[in-house]
Amino acid sequence: MSQSSQFSEAPLPLFDDDEVQIVPALPHGKRPSYITDHRKRLRARFLSGGAQALPDYEILELLLFRAIPRQDVKPLAHKLLEKFGDFNRVIAAPPARLSEVRGVGEAVICELKIVEAAAQRLARARIMRHHVVSSWDALLDYCHTTMAHRDTEQFRVLYLDRKNVLITDEEQASGTVDHVPVYPREVVKRALELNASALILVHNHPSGDPAPSSEDIAMTAQIEAAAKALNISLHDHLIIGKSTELSFRSEGLL
């Protein structure tokens, strides 16, 4: 990205080599009044009405304000939404794909990834050390937050104790857009290390369709058999789509 890019990032303390484009007619560090007034109005609307009072592009503008202090960020917000589809997909997009958008540099990517990390930690906090059955909706929210908008498959295992309280959840593998390698032996071995009594498998389908493939069904059967041999229960296998999920247990596949 060159110094003449339409959008460019002003320097922040964490970044030494972000691009800078100052409006020439203004003193260093100043911004046109229309930008200042717009930002004040947008922040005021957010504080008075909350996120529901703003469309996706304006929520993105609020995030971009810090990364790009002296430029109009509305066009960049629209570009990001055009490329990725919606707010969630912008936040979850890999850094390499974000950087393909003209005007996106390290500071912008950092701001977006901070929001993604915060969302995941908040969702995870609602389920860790909680009884899975009583927090099932929170568990589904967490799975969707962390996996629904990924563009490659990820396989996670939730390990439970004898009281069905979540001990931990761990990523076991990540793969391509339609495949992730899973090793039943490693899944069960980790359960023994954690002294877990039960498992919930979770993986996503980047296509958005949570219908299980024949490989998904076969892999689940292998893990179930390996776990059963060691008296470990497989409670469910969840496949996360873009807006819904499929439960093997509910579908009679377990």
Image: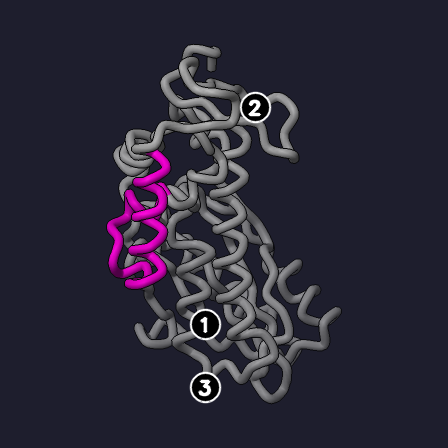
Dividing the picture into quadrants, the one containing residue 193 is: bottom right
Q: Amino acid at mark 2?
A: Asp
Q: Amino acid at mark 3?
A: Ser
Residue 177 falls within the magenta-colored stretch:
no
Q: Earlier in the sequence, mark 1 or mark 2?
A: 2
Rendered-image quadrant of the C terminus: bottom left
Viewer-proximal residue among 75 and 206? 75
Dividing the picture into quadrants, the one containing residue 151 is: top left
At which x and y percent is residue 103?
A: 41, 24
Residue 127 versus residue 202 in the image, above or below? below
Query: Can you tell which mark lies on residue 139?
Result: 1
Query: Can you tell which mark lies on residue 134?
Result: 3
Return the residue at label 2: 18
Viewer-proximal residue among 66 and 124? 66
Res. 129 visible in picture:
yes
Q: Amino acid at mark 1?
A: Leu
Residue range corresponding to the magenta coloring: 35-61
Look at 28% across and 48% down and name the residue there.
56
At which x and y percent is residue 110?
A: 54, 39
Res. 228 visible in picture:
no
Q: Secondary structure at mark 2?
A: loop
How many angstroms separate mark 1 from mark 2 (CA)? 38 Å
Viewer-proximal residue among 71 and 208? 71
Q: Residues within 10 Å of mark 1 (few under 14, many from 20)?
A: many
Main SS type for the magenta part?
helix
Q: Earlier in the sequence, mark 1 or mark 3?
A: 3
